[in-house]
Image (cartoon, helix red, strand yellow):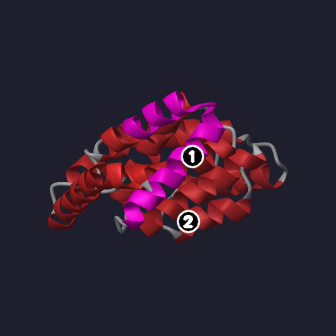
Amino acid sequence: LDYSSKLQQTQIGFEVLMGGAENATKHLKELQDFAKSTPFSGLEFAKISQGLQGAGVQAQNVIPLLKAIGNTVAATGEVSAERLEGVSRAITQIISKTKVSAEEMEQLAERGIPAWKILSDALGKTQQETRKLAEQGLISSDILIKALKQVSEVKYGDAMEKQTGTFSGAMSKIQNAVLAASATAFAPFYQEI
């Protein structure tokens, strides 16, 4: 029931963010469908999507960004909802600030994401030079996001999908399917109340 409640709250949040129930329902379904080939739940992705959209990311750009973040997380360390949320929070903060700052880059590094290396390689600079540019506020968040997407595609590819083939990934998929089915089954009861 907690899952159903969170799903309803998420739906309402998306309705506000996206200007209506139809757009919200469509986006939530896209997130749930996307989650099926990952070790994460649609609700986890929905929570992250709300934050990204709140920071100004357009809904149509959310899933490609989630794919880049998720594959990077799945390839570089522990595959957990907490780690995905922490990495996504740091990325969302960078997007909100519209520039790269050491604070969020260190949050990414603490979670095993080689963000300084990814960014330095994209800029063709050393990590020290990249840090200096960031301190001066000269690196936009768009540059980091583009670099993250590129590295994710080239280096980390389909890491999330591969993780679903592990025991814990399979258990996560089963749990997600059961939760989604129960939410659908209990929906008529919520509507009656």
Circle 1 or circle 2, nearest the eye:
1
Q: Quadrant of residue 75?
A: bottom left
Label 1: how many residues lie within 10 Å, few (<14), some (14-19) or many (20+)?
A: some
Residue 4 pos. (x, y %): 39, 58
Drawn side of residue 192 relative to residue 182, left or right = right
The residue located at (24%, 52%) in the rendering is: 181
Q: Amino acid at mark 2?
A: Ala
Residue 24 lies in magenta, yes or no?
yes
- The residue pinned by badge 2 equals 109
Q: Nearer the viewer, residue 175 or 136?
A: 175
Look at the magenta stretch and give its main secondary structure: helix
Earlier-in-chain disc, 1 versus 2: 1
Q: Residue furthest front?
A: 192
Q: Amino acid at mark 1?
A: Ile
> Which of the labelled discs sits on residue 99, or is there none?
none
Residue 176 pos. (x, y %): 27, 57
Report if residue 104 is visible in the image. yes
Report if residue 72 is visible in the image. no
Q: Quadrant of the N terminus?
A: bottom left
> How many discs appear?
2
- The residue pinned by badge 1 equals 12
Whole-angstrom CA distance, mark 1 to mark 2, is 34 Å
Drawn side of residue 144 relative to residue 138, left or right = left
Residue 27 lies in magenta, yes or no?
yes
Q: Secondary structure at mark 1?
A: helix
Magenta residues? 1-30
The residue located at (39%, 35%) in the rendering is: 30
The residue located at (59%, 31%) in the rendering is: 20
Label 2: how many residues lie within 10 Å, few (<14), some (14-19) or many (20+)?
A: some
The residue located at (44%, 31%) in the rendering is: 26
Drawn side of residue 186 relative to residue 43, left or right = left
Q: Nearer the viewer, residue 69 or 174?
A: 174
